[in-house]
Each structure stands twice: as structure tokens, then as C-alpha cells.
Amino acid sequence: MTDQVHLVVVTQPEQDGRIMGDQLWIAATPLDEAVAAVQRELQPGWTARLADHAPSKELVERLRLAPGTVSELTEASRAAK
């Protein structure tokens, strides 16, 4: 299952001249669908791109993602045990 789970970086547009921080999302989809799956969940103007690294096997196992799941990773979800 880990080969069907991908990390996606989401970038918010600038607000009031301030650059907003990136978010990390996870998509339990085939690689060629991951960015589009996340992009469908975003507000207009936000952008998504594949992360430079894959999620760890441990993270994937902890999250127990159903196929097709797309979700923002929060500090709590990253640390969930």
C-alpha cells in the first residue's frame, strides 16, 4: 500500500503581501492522480505539487488510509500512535 500513498505540498497564495507557509497533504492514490486529487480539495488560487520525498512506512501504517483518501497532515496526525 505504501507505493500508492504520496505526499503533496500545498502552497497558499499571498495574503496582504505576506507569503503564507506550505502545508503537507497525503493522498492514498496512484502517483499520477495524487496532485489532482489534492487540488480538487483546495480553494481557488492554492497550488499542489508532489513532495520531494515519500511518506514513511510507519506513517502510512499509523494513518491506515483507505484508497482514495486525501487529507492534510497536521502535527497530531504525524505524531499519532
Image (cartoon, rainbow, N blue to C red):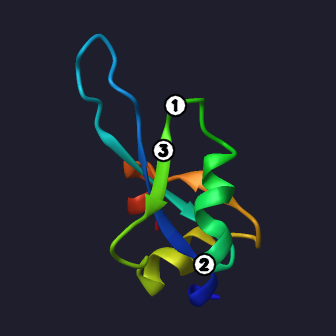
Residues at marks 2 and 1, CA–CA distance in whole angstroms: 23 Å
Residue in the foreground of this view, choosing between 43 and 70: 43
Task: Give amino acid for label 2.
Answer: Leu
- Residue 74 locus on image (x, y percent): 43, 48
Q: Quadrant of the N terminus?
A: bottom right
Q: Report the side of 22 relative to 6 (left or right).
A: left
Give above or below for 51 relative to 14.
below
- In this rendering, the label closer to the viewer, 2 or 1: 1
Task: Give amino acid for label 1.
Answer: Gly
- Kindly identify which residue carries mark 2: 31
Q: Residue at x 35, y 77 (%)?
A: 53
Secondary element at image label 1: loop
First-in-chain label (2 vs 1)? 2
Give above or below for 30 relative to 70.
below
Q: Quadrant of residue 66?
A: bottom right
Decide: few, some or many residues near mark 2? Use Cα within 10 Å; few <14, some 14-19, many ≥20.
some
Q: Residue at x 43, y 76 (%)?
A: 55
Decide: few, some or many residues near mark 1? Use Cα within 10 Å; few <14, some 14-19, many ≥20.
few
- Kindly identify which residue carries mark 1: 45
Residues at marks 3 and 1, CA–CA distance in whole angstroms: 6 Å
Residues at marks 2 and 3, CA–CA distance in whole angstroms: 17 Å
- Kindly identify which residue carries mark 3: 47
Give above or below for 31 relative to 76.
below
Q: Is residue 80 visible?
A: no
Task: Give amino acid for label 3.
Answer: Thr
First-in-chain label (2 vs 3)? 2
- Residue 13 locus on image (x, y percent): 39, 29
Give above or below for 33 relative to 45.
below
- Residue 50 locus on image (x, y percent): 45, 66
CB within 8 Å, label 3 to label 1: yes
